[in-house]
Image (cartoon, rainbow, N blue to C red):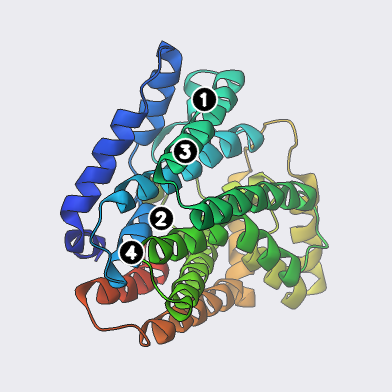
Amino acid sequence: MYKNIRAVVSSDFDAVNQFIIDQLYSDVALVESIGHYIIDAGGKRMRPVLVLLGAKSCGYEGDQHIALAAVIEFIHTATLLHDDVVDMSSMRRGRPTANEQWNNPSSVLVGDFIYSRAFQVLVSIGNMDIMKIIADTTNRIAEGEVLQLINKNNSGATQEGYMNVIRHKTAILFQAASECGAILAGANADQQKVLRDVGMHIGMAFQLIDDVLDYEGDAQTMGKNIGDDLAEGKPTLPLIYAMRNGTSEEATLLKSCIEGASNEGDKTIAEQQLQDVIAIIKRSGGLDYTRELAIAEADKAIALLGTLADSPFRQALVDMANLAVHRAS
């Protein structure tokens, strides 16, 4: 499905990838090495594609959407570099993380470089409305990361708190991507709001499914270990739901796993304990419940898209909403 989505903006997508490569130049060899390492790891590039589709669905005919899409991808990449240090992660997209391949200080500092390069490119675009949205979005992402850190090992985490974390940490960059594409195209206020809300709903659906896959996905397909969220002490929705709806004995076990997750980088979980946790989550309906919320978010995005003029780009956005929930990685 994703190949078909990208095919709608294939030449623009290729231009974004080339622009990203060109913008990773630095006189410091280590900056280029780590920058290329994480960019070359791939990924779906859903966020920059949202920029392209958001702009094109509103009739944009210029070329600044290429630079804007790269800005969004740079911000996402910088957050990954920082997240992997905070989470003490050793694997992403099927290969060692940058902090594992080099070290934590190098990963953090190159993340800072990529953040600053994003804002250099943003200045060259020269649209103050877009600059404000990107600046506010980056600030809120940082708040989301802190909220998640506060919730680490918190067995009393609530669904409301969880939804607030993923709205700040993940969905808001999807929102910024699609909204800024519309602004760049000179869309009217109603169209901008539609694209803003579409991005938020797709981002929420994406993260909800990410948290489902952490308990039922395939490690090789996802490129990371099953149960990483549990090992990191992150109370995501499947676990929160299971603690709320399982038996008292099950809730006690789940709470002890969350509270006992290591803060010292040891992310190994006894295989039997992990299988017990997964079984409880499935038995409680936690995965089904989380998936249902994701589908509801995608449906909201699709309904909003019905208000835009029909085009291949609008259809690709509908496909993006469906992809967010029907994926294996």
Q: Amino acid at mark 3?
A: Ala
Marks 3 and 2 sit apart, C-alpha to C-alpha, by 14 Å
From this viewpoint, is residue 230 visible? yes
Foreground disc of the pair 4, 2: 4
The N terminus sits in image quarter: bottom left
Real-space Cα separation, disc 3 to disc 4, in angstroms: 19 Å
**Nearest to the observer: residue 33 or residue 296:** 33
Mark 2 or mark 1: whose residue is earlier in sequence: 2
What's under tag 4, amino acid-wise? Answer: Ala
Location of residue 90 in the rendering, given as x and y in whole percent from the top left corner = 53, 32
Q: Left or right: 303 with respect to 42?
A: right
Q: Is residue 99 left or right of residue 94?
A: right
Dot in front, 3 or 2: 3
Q: Which residue is disc 2 drawn over?
A: 47
Q: Which residue is the site of mark 1?
A: 110
Q: Which mark is residue 198?
A: none
Q: Which residue is mark 3?
A: 118
Of residue 51 and residue 146, the one placed in the foreground of this image is: 51
Q: Is residue 325 above or below residue 263?
A: below
Identify the residue at image location x=55%, y=41%: 79
Mark closest to the chain's N terminus, 3 or 4: 4
Q: Residue at x 82, y 72 (%)?
A: 248
* Picture residue at 45% right of the left edge, 43% below the top: 122
Q: Nearer the viewer, residue 191 or 98?
A: 191
Q: Secondary structure at mark 3?
A: helix
